[in-house]
């Protein structure tokens, strides 16, 4: 491992700790995460590329709200994640064939990034789709939860296509 790269949540003795960001200057931070859900044909056919109502409600609308709520609670869910008052969270669901792609974008002006908030939003939105559709089939697969992009702070990141 190169000298400049290290696990920031470990001290020199290997003990877990919360990263100290008190000396950092706030800057605009943005992160985009994505999750993909593979649906069995019986469920995918119901969507016909659009949102559908299930007994629990409109699937895409409910997943969008769940993702936004989850982003706001990330600091409560991830033990060493700084609690951040996110300023913007957007969750988009697009269906093509039998795959739903969820894209979550989070932004804030802060001393630390919002990658975990975007990743949490995408993850919980995907779990919500599963929860709302599981009565029809448990053969739903959530896959590829990944960071697509982050900007602000010392290092920007963009996933290569």
Image (tube, helix red, strand yellow):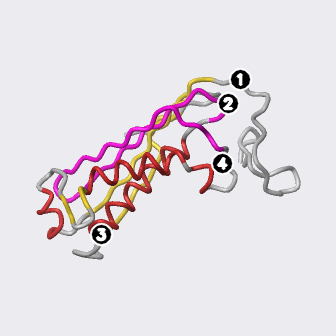
Name the disc covering residue 81, or none: 4
Element marked by disc 1: loop
Q: Is residue 44 left or right of residue 113?
A: left
In the rendering, at what x and y percent does residue 11 appear?
84, 50
Tell which circle, 1 or 2, labels the residue nearer the N-terminal end. Answer: 1
Name the disc covering residue 140, or none: 3
Q: Is residue 128 left or right of residue 11?
A: left
Closer to the camera, 3 or 76?
A: 76
User: Which residue is at 63% across, 29% downward?
Assistant: 110
In the rendering, at what x and y percent does residue 10 appear?
78, 52
Whether residues under marks 4 and 3 lie with C-beta atoms below 8 angstroms apart, the answer is: no
Element marked by disc 3: loop
Name the disc covering residue 131, or none: none
Q: Main secondary structure of the magenta part?
A: strand
For the record, the magenta segment spans: 83-112
In the rendering, at what x and y percent does residue 13 appear?
88, 55
Find disc 1 in the rendering and name its residue. 25
Tell which circle, 1 or 4, labels the residue nearer the N-terminal end. Answer: 1
Tell which circle, 2 or 3, labels the residue nearer the N-terminal end. Answer: 2
């Amino acid at each position: 491992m190169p000298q400049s790269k290290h696990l920031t949540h470990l001290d020199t003795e290997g003990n877990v700790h919360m990263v100290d960001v008190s000396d950092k200057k706030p800057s605009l931070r943005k992160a985009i995460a994505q999750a993909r859900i593979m649906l069995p044909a019986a469920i995918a056919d119901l969507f016909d590329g659009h949102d559908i109502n299930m007994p629990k409600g409109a699937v895409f609308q409910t997943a969008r709200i769940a993702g936004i709520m989850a982003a706001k609670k990330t600091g409560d869910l991830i033990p060493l994640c700084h609690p951040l008052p996110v300023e913007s969270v957007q969750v988009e669901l697009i269906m093509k064939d039998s795959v739903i792609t969820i894209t979550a974008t989070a932004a804030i002006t802060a001393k630390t990034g919002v990658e975990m908030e975007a990743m949490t939003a995408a993850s919980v939105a995907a779990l919500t789709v599963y929860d709302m559709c599981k009565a029809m089939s448990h053969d739903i697969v959530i896959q590829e939860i990944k960071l697509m992009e982050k900007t602000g702070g010392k290092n920007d990141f963009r996933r290569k296509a």
